[in-house]
Amino acid sequence: MKICYFSCSSIYGGVEKIVVDSLNEISKYYECALIVPNGCRYKDKISSNVKIIEYKSYDKRYNLFLYLEVFNVIKNYDIVHTHGAKATQITYLLNKISPFIHIATKHNTRKGKIFNKVKNVISVSSEVAKTITHPSKVLYFGIQKSENLEVKKNDIFTILAIGRLDPIKGFDNLIKEVSKLDFEFRLNIIGEGSQKEKLEKLIIDNKLENKVSLLGFKNNIPEYLASSHLQVISSLTEGLPLTLLEGIMNSPVIISTPVGGIVEVLDKDYLVKIEDFSTKITEIYNNYQNICEDFKSKHEHFKEKFDFNDYSKNLIEYYKGCVNAKTL
């Protein structure tokens, strides 16, 4: 099989990590390529086994030059796997004039009518699958286990949030909630994005400069998770965030808003409305060791479910099934 991935994103976040890790694994066995925008920021994370094609045309869905540029690449591949609505829209139309197999992954529960038109869709969770009008393949991503991770817990009760600085991640609400806490703590937010200045102002307005930090992009996420006391996910909507899977592997305790595929993983005791975050965080702080033990007992089995090797095997089997179905 010759497999080409296509993404219109140039930043590096959870979806892009899925693209990178998946390609790096399957390129060990098959000829692979990746189409991304010119100036893509995560090229250095891609294996040398993968051919990288950066398109230079103006990045709009109905730019004819972009379609021609992409078509000249994907016409040479058996499978084109798209990530994101824009790449999926472009590839869906090009598939009408070229016989490659189009597979699209839907990463969130937001509207995306184009996924209703694509025959072969992978959903990152059962909740995402419910947003598509035809059956899709539910395939949970997997995480490489961090073996023998030895880190020292921070002395101050440390809360960690991870994600791009975007309104959909709810970090403004999170900052407002931690401003209500009446014990010593630190909130670290890892990520970059368009909301940085707004969040910085919110931190100053709430006099939290010594308690809340925007750390920017970080590579060593497992270490940050393991050294923190609590991981929080404050999103307004999600598919199945990579940060949750990384947390299951490395965080002592996680709480999250009850959105998307998160409700398929976290026990109800750890699903919290954003307006109740300060109350829940205080409860965890006051009874930390017992809650850590409870969280572990309820979620330890997910470490096997989210194993990366199982994910990659299932992904390759899905590819083979699509190829076999086409040749019948």
Image: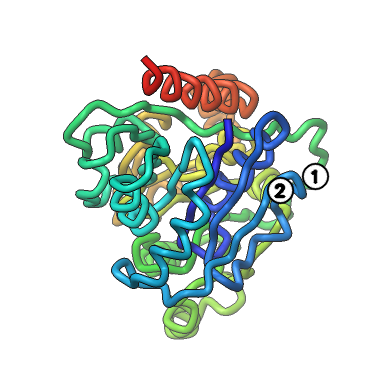
Measured from the top left, where is residue 106 in percent x and y? 36, 43
**131 on left or right of 237:** left
124 shown above or below 167? above
**31 on left or right of 161:** right
**130 on left or right of 311:** left
Q: Residue at x 58, y 52 (%)?
A: 34
* Label of residue 294 in the image: none
The type of residue carrying mark 2 is Ser
Within 10 Å of disc 1 (Cα), the crowding (few <14, some 14-19, many 20+) is few
Quarter of the rendering containing residue 151: top right
**Residue 184 in sight here:** no
Q: Which residue is mark 2?
A: 227
> Dot 1 lies on which element?
loop
Quarter of the rendering containing residue 13: bottom right
Q: Which residue is mark 1?
A: 151
> Dot 2 lies on which element?
helix
Quarter of the rendering containing residue 157: bottom right
Of the numbered discs 1 and 2, the one sitting upstream in the chain is 1
**If the image is split into quadrants, where does the N terminus sit?**
top right
Q: Residue at x 37, y 62 (%)?
A: 170
**Residue 313 in sight here:** yes
The type of residue carrying mark 1 is Val
Seen as rendered, the residue at the extreme left is 133
Measured from the top left, where is residue 283 in percent x and y? 45, 44
**If the image is split into quadrants, where does the C terminus sit?**
top left
Check whether the beta carbons of the residues at disc 1 and disc 2 lie within 8 A of each other: yes
Measured from the top left, where is residue 123 in percent x and y? 36, 35
210 shown above or below 222? below
Measured from the top left, where is residue 301 in percent x and y? 54, 18
Within 10 Å of disc 2 (Cα), the crowding (few <14, some 14-19, many 20+) is many
